[in-house]
Amino acid sequence: MEVFDTLITALSNDKLDHTPSNFHILVAEDNDINAHVAEQYLKSMGYKVSRVRDGQQAIDLCSDPNNQYDAILMDINMPKVDGYEATKVLREKLRLTIPIIALTANAFEEDIKKSLAIGMNKHLVKPFDKEDLQLVLRSLLAENETTN
């Protein structure tokens, strides 16, 4: 636990030009309970949050240049267009480079490899806790800031 606390402290002192309130996170999740948990975690960390219920809605929102997101939490199993297909479109057709984090109950090594191979940056297994989400977001957003 000391290592985790040290990481959180170190990441809290990073040199980001933005505070969490300047970041807008899109949550693509069809399950109301899971979406609510993710939204509450994100809001309590200071992020601005938008939510969609399927991959097609995520694609549609991200296609609109008026909508700018800094990261996407993407459920894998959603109706219409699943998280894998949505990520493929976001990466290949829309050329988005923002972090996309897989949210899924699938925790096998092949599931993680598939998420990363399709273009997702991280793979969070549900149920995830606030600290894990915070650590992943801070790391990816800091990394994205330095590469863009």
Image (spheres, grey):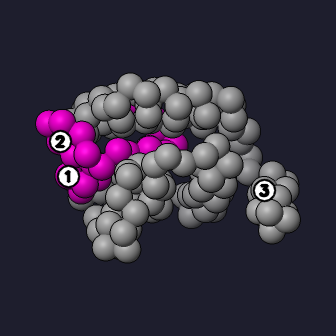
Tag 3–tag 2 contact (CB < 8 Å) = no
Query: Dot 3 lies on which element?
Result: helix
Q: Earlier in the sequence, mark 3 or mark 2?
A: 3
Give the number of the mark in front: 3 or 1.
3
User: Residue 121 vs residue 7: left or right?
Assistant: left
User: Residue 50 vs residue 142: left or right?
Assistant: left
Question: Foreground residue, 84 or 119?
Answer: 84
Can residue 130 be seen in this snapshot?
yes
Q: Earlier in the sequence, mark 3 or mark 1?
A: 3
Residue annotated with mark 1 = 85
Residue at 73%, 39% in the rendered image: 19
Vertical placement of 131 versus 113: above or below?
Answer: above
Tell me where the magenta segment starts and ends, as one range.
63-88
**Residue 118 in picture, x, y percent from top left:** 28, 64
Q: How far apart are marks 3 and 1 (CA)?
A: 33 Å
Q: Distance between the residues labelled 3 and 2?
A: 35 Å
Question: Foreground residue, 142 or 113?
Answer: 113
User: Residue 11 vs residue 40: left or right?
Assistant: right
Circle number at residue 8: 3
